[in-house]
Image: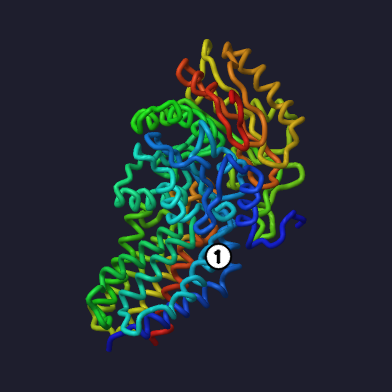
């Protein structure tokens, strides 16, 4: 089984809905260790994405949709999250440029490219208490599932579950990148909002592929 | 929450349209995407200066657009970096063929968005340099943080680099002057209360009636420590110590002393702080040669202030004294 443009569109719509639902929660997390705008900024970005989906060509590929998401987020989100998520979707789009449908290998390639894009733009490493702490275990889990011959739905479920664990595991960490790094030890006990929104996005991917 | 607004979602749009209405002839405001540009931009052959960042710090940066300072300012949402599109549009609008300097406060969002915009401008053959301002001594600069933040010292970088560009320095020279200011300026802030971001509607952090936050950033990010309220002179001593040790400033230096209000502290209190800061510097054999006092880099309605000290030499002094005509700083013309 492979996932086509319909799935990418469903995933993007589900992401917009889950971000809107969790807007206040993301603001609350960001207020604790950042500047309290993460939920607001992402909600603004994905709302803008929704408004642009209807303008896609009828024969749009998964890569076309991902690129539209990327450019829209880059131009509407701001803060650190805009360039980071924008780069993630842009790299994912480039990784599946020639795929009309995403088979397990293409899906893992897209997730890997997204994570690599975030790392190269933000220069964060695992353990820095950033979205990388959700993405890295997610990519590892997706690659392992694909190696074992899992179907696309199971691969995305493995990625989402690993991202959720990774987000939870940012709680005891001291931040070494972004605004939370100014807090030092005071960041301990708080979940990183970028890792949390990453887990929400990946869970939406799994839910729409199930 | 009581705020003089119409709608939390239109704060930036309505404010920049007010800036346009208040300062005709000096600047123009573009609305799609939003940026503020000198009325006479682009000036052929002059290096263009662009800065920007989240709104809520006014007059930074829009209030510094004009003769002898910035060519354009790009305001983001409140306390949120602008996106690359308006930064690119502003860069194009001020490019007079001599290149463009981006003056960026060291915050992760600002740095990433300006970096992306600079990449896009380079792709259009506009030569772009960037200076990252990081004057805040409250943050330890190490591999384990995002580095020191850019705070009130940014005003001094914009003024002095702006004067260098206005007198005709080329891109290398203007960049070098901006870097020299950044290398010689140190700041630290303190908060007595928290700001309220309009669309959040609640204070950005919780702080007790009898507490202050030493080393606050300009978005209300925490600093070094939270302590019980103290008299003004004791707070000034706590701030000046790390500032003076850091460069270090020493006996015989000439400096510019800048006491900046963060929005909610009355000028009468800033003067009390200024008085003691000047006494301390003089007592250490440091000459307060130039001064600036007032609300220049604010954090919405936050009560608090910052102290900035810039070590001067003849070049920096001459550029500081050069004529400037902006909404918030004006002398010499």
Q: Quadrant of residue B155?
A: top right
Q: Residue at x 58, y 63 (%)?
A: A27
Residue at screen point 35% across, 39% down: B99
Identify the residue under disc 1: A39
* Residue shown at 66% from the left, 61% from the top: B8
Residue toward you, B120 or B226 = B120
Q: Where does residue B169 sit, x and y in percent of width and height? A: 38, 27
Front residue (pair B286, B256) = B256
Vertical placement of residue B207 versus B67, above or below: below
The percent position of residue B239, horizontal first and vertical second, equals 61, 29
Front residue of B3/B138: it is B3
- How far across and down, in percent of the image, does residue A103 sit? 25, 82
Q: Position of residue B112 (x, y in %)?
A: 41, 51
Label 1 element class: helix
The answer to whether residue B143 is left or right of residue A2 is right
Chain of the residue displaying label 1: A
- Residue at 75 percent across and 57 percent down: it is B1
């Amino acid at each position: 089984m492979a996932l086509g443009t319909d799935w990418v569109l469903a995933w993007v719509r589900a992401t917009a809905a889950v971000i809107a639902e969790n807007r206040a929660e993301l603001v609350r997390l960001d207020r604790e260790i950042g500047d309290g705008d993460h939920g607001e900024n992402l909600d603004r970005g994905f709302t803008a994405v929704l408004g642009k989906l209807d303008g896609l060509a009828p024969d749009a590929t998964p890569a076309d949709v991902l690129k539209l998401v990327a450019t829209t987020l880059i131009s509407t989100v701001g803060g650190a999250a805009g360039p980071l998520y924008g780069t993630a979707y842009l790299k994912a789009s480039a990784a599946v440029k020639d795929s009309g449908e995403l088979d397990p290998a293409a899906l893992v390639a897209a997730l890997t490219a997204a994570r690599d894009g975030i790392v190269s733009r933000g220069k964060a490493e695992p353990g820095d208490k950033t979205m990388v702490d959700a993405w890295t275990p997610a990519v590892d889990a997706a690659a392992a599932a694909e190696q074992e011959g899992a179907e696309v739905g199971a691969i995305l479920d493995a990625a989402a579950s690993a991202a959720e664990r990774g987000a939870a595991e940012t709680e005891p960490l001291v931040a070494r990148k972004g605004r939370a790094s100014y807090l030092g030890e005071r960041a301990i006990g708080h979940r990183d909002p970028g890792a949390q929104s990453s887990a929400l996005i990946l869970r939406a991917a799994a839910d729409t592929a199930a | 929450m009581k705020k003089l607004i119409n709608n939390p979602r239109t704060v930036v749009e309505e404010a920049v349209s007010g800036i346009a209405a208040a300062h005709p002839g000096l600047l123009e405001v573009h609305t799609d995407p939003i940026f503020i540009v000198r009325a006479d931009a682009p000036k052929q052959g002059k290096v263009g200066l662009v800065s920007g960042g989240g709104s809520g710090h006014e007059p930074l940066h829009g209030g510094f657009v004009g003769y002898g300072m910035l060519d354009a300012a790009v305001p983001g949402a409140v306390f949120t970096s602008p996106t690359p599109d308006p930064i690119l549009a502003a860069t194009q609008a001020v490019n007079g063929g001599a290149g463009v300097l981006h003056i960026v406060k060291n915050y992760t969002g600002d740095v990433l968005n300006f970096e992306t915009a600079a990449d896009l401008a380079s792709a259009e053959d506009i030569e772009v340099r960037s200076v990252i301002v990081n004057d805040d001594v409250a943050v330890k600069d190490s591999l384990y943080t995002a580095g020191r933040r850019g705070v009130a010292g940014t005003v001094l970088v914009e003024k002095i680099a702006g004067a260098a560009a206005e007198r005709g320095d080329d891109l290398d020279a203007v960049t070098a002057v901006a870097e020299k200011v950044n290398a010689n300026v140190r700041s630290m802030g303190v908060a007595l209360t928290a700001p309220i971001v309009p669309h959040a509607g609640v204070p950005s952090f919780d702080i007790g009636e009898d507490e202050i936050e030493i080393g606050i950033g300009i978005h209300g990010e925490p600093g070094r420590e939270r302590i019980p309220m103290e008299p003004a002179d004791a707070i000034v001593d706590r701030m000046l110590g790390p500032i003076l040790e850091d460069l270090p400033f020493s006996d015989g230096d000439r400096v510019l002393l800048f006491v900046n209000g963060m929005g909610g502290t009355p000028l009468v209190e800033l003067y009390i702080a200024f008085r003691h800061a000047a006494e301390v510097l003089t007592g250490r054999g440091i000459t307060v040669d130039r001064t600036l006092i007032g609300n220049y880099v604010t954090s919405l309605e936050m009560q608090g202030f910052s102290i900035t000290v810039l070590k001067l030499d003849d070049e920096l002094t001459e550029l500081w004294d050069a004529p400037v005509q902006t909404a918030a700083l004006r002398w010499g013309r």
